[in-house]
């Protein structure tokens, strides 16, 4: 810009804007120094990653992140808040570094509508944001009413605690208030849902608390499926750490809950059996966050199909969808996966705005779970894009060894803490 | 009108020079993407803030050798053996080189 005077520069902007409007010149003209404008909807695991990575890869791209909350409470490690050995402030992150260190424009608002033809996002507060590329990362919403009687009001009596924050603390308070000998009921949905190992880790963490404070209590898991993530490792861990405390009822033994009576703290299964708990944690069926569904990004399944090489929507141009909202083949709905996809989408957007080619991606996912603070297990996979979509690389990945000593489990527990520190620093940190 | 055209021509030149002033594309995308998988655990630029081993400052040879040993189950591991088995020799060399040269 050094060859242009200030006055020329003002003219340049005006002329560029006029030319842009008149002859549809690329937005780089109207934007002066900007290579392109990216809007990111959602400042969670996927969206905050993508916003930061784009700015790190190319400072000439303008990035606006739309997120209604001033701070973000992670679901990962919220089970340890429920168990009482982590505080909620230790899992709360803010957007200060994204804004001040990385130059992301953070707009505290909710995206209400996407106009794909005009490449515009309308916000609830009334503003409109124009984009060249849009990244949509709204996470999940609950299918209220899919379990009869379970709506948002019911969740004040029977918390889901499947979006972290006040619900996490509510479940914690209920466990603290429960008398020794009480029954804790957890209901778990069919696949796909956020964090496949999460419910089983939560059962272990609740047992960890009960074993110390209310040892006569029990946990009943009513499950809408017959198998689950890291099942053998979880069942071994439950048995060795909390013998007799956790009972798991699969679908085939009438585990699917179809109705709840919040005032009676009672749930009813498919075959009509009723269970009454002292504390009831309902993890409801889910689908993609509302903005994705309202904008035509989801298909009949309620989730968003994407091109696995770029995570660009197969239902809209110039729109990428990442994180839990997507249909991502063999990749689970995890924070790790959302971070991996956020990086890929960032690279895809940067490459496209720079007219550079985009190479075939690989992804990694690892989900650590803690049976107890010093007892960790994990599942890890490397993923590749094939004609069949995203598949786990054969002969790689898998779960922690079934036979392992206490030292091994302790190492994995340490690495779980290290993973959280690295990942949250990578996403929200300076 | 001629003045506007002249201004627009100046714009075009300015735009082009801005584009050329951008940093060079750098390493191939695939190597960059490979390293992005590692930073989720080892930390941004390998500067792990917690219990994960840091990777910054390591030589490409050390990283590649470690990955080959993990892959062959010849190095003690909790998780790297499972991850390393997902990569080819060429990818191991590419990711090791990329980390050693770009993670600062
Ligand atoms: C108990 C529990 C434990 C878990 N443990 C782990 C773990 O150990 N490891 C792991 O990898 N994963 C774990 N997960 C899964 C992880 O939380 C999710 O996979 C991850 O949050 C998905 O990221 P996302 O970006 O898709 O959604 P989110 O992280 O939920 O972010 C979505 C964001 O979008 C915002 N948003 C939504 N709609 C709009 C809108 N219209 N406009 C603007 N903003 C909007 C929301 O406010 C939110 O901030 C766990 C989940 C649970 C419930």
Image (cartoon, coloured by chain):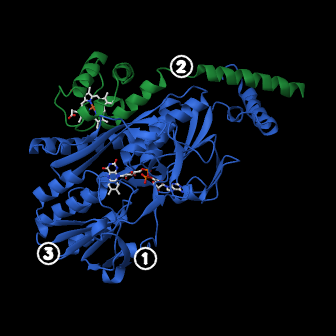
Could you say whether the residue bearing mark 1 is in a helix, strand or loop?
loop
User: How far separated are the C-alphas under marks 1 and 3?
Assistant: 30 Å
Q: Which of the numbered marks, if any, corresponds to residue B24?
A: 2
Which of the numbered marks, if any, corresponds to residue A402?
A: none
Residue at the front extreme of this rendering: A252
Helix, strand or loop at label 3? It is: loop
- Where does the N terminus of chain B fall, quadrant-wise? top right
Q: Nearer the viewer, residue A208 or A240?
A: A240
Which chain is depicted green? B
- Residue for badge 1: A148
Circle 3 chain: A
**Total number of numbered labels?**
3
Left or right: residue A318 versus residue A325 is right
Horizontal side, residue A396 vs residue A342: left or right = left
**Shade representing chain A:** blue
Quadrant location of residue A208?
bottom left
Mark 1 or 3, which is nearer the eye?
1
Same-chain check, marks 2 and 3 = no
Furthest residue toward right: B1
The residue sitting at 25% across, 38% down in the picture is B50
- Residue that badge 3 annotates: A180
Pointer 1: residues within 10 angstroms few (<14), some, or many (20+)?
A: some
SS for callout 2 = loop
Residue A346, position in %: x, y?
50, 36
Of labels 1 and 3, earlier in sequence is 1
User: Is the residue A113 above or below the residue A24 in the image?
Assistant: below
Name the image quarter holding residue A48.
top left
């Amino acid at each position: 810009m050094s060859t242009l005077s200030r006055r020329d520069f003002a003219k340049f902007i005006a002329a560029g804007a006029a030319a842009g409007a008149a002859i549809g010149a690329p937005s780089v003209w109207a934007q002066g120094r900007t290579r392109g404008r990216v809007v990111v909807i959602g400042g969670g695991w996927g969206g905050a990653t993508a916003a930061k990575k784009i700015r790190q890869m190319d400072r000439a791209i303008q990035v606006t992140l739309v997120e209604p909350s001033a701070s973000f409470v992670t679901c990962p490690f919220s089970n340890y808040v429920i168990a009482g050995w982590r505080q909620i402030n230790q899992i709360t992150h803010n957007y200060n570094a994204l804004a001040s260190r990385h130059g992301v424009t953070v707009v505290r608002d909710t995206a209400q509508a996407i106009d794909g033809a005009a490449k515009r996002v309308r916000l609830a507060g009334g503003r409109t944001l124009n984009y060249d590329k849009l990244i949509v990362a709204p996470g999940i919403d609950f299918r209220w009413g899919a379990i009869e009687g379970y709506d948002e009001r019911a969740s004040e009596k029977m918390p889901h605690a499947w979006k972290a924050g006040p619900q996490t603390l509510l479940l914690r308070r209920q466990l603290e208030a429960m008398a020794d000998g009480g029954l804790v009921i957890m209901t778990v949905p069919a696949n796909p849902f956020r964090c496949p190992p999460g419910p089983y880790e939560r059962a272990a963490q609740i047992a960890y608390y009960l074993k110390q404070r209310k040892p006569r209590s029990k946990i009943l898991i009513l499950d809408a499926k017959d198998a689950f993530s890291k099942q053998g490792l979880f069942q071994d861990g439950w048995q060795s750490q909390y013998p007799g405390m956790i009972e798991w009822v699969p679908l085939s033994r009438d585990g699917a809950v179809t109705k709840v009576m919040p005032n009676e703290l009672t749930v009813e299964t498919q075959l009509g059996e009723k269970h009454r708990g002292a504390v009831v944690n309902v993890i409801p069926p889910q689908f993609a966050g509302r903005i994705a569904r309202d904008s035509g990004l989801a298909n009949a399944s309620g989730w968003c199909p994407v091109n696995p090489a770029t995570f660009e929507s197969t239902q809209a141009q110039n729109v990428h969808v990442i994180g839990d909202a997507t249909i991502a083949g063999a990749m689970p709905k995890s924070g790790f996966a959302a971070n991996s996809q956020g990086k890929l989408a960032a690279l895809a957007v940067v490459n496209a705005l720079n007219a550079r080619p985009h190479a075939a991606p690989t992804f990694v996912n690892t989900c650590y779970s803690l049976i107890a603070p010093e007892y960790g297990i994990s599942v890890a996979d490397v993923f590749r894009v094939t004609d069949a979509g995203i598949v786990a690389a054969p002969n790689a990945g898998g779960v922690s060894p079934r036979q392992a000593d206490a030292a091994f489990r302790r190492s994995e527990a340490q690495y779980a803490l290290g993973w959280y520190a690295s990942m949250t620093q990578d996403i929200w940190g300076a | 009108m001629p003045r506007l055209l002249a201004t627009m021509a100046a714009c075009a030149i300015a735009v082009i020079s801005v584009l050329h002033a951008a940093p060079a594309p750098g390493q191939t995308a695939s190597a960059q993407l490979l390293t992005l998988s590692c930073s989720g655990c080892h930390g941004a630029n390998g500067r792990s803030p917690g219990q994960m081993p840091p990777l910054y400052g390591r030589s490409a040879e050390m990283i590649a050798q470690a990955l080959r040993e993990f892959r062959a189950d010849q190095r003690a591991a909790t998780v790297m053996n499972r991850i390393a088995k997902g990569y080819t020799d060429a990818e191991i060399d590419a990711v090791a080189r990329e980390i050693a040269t770009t993670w600062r």
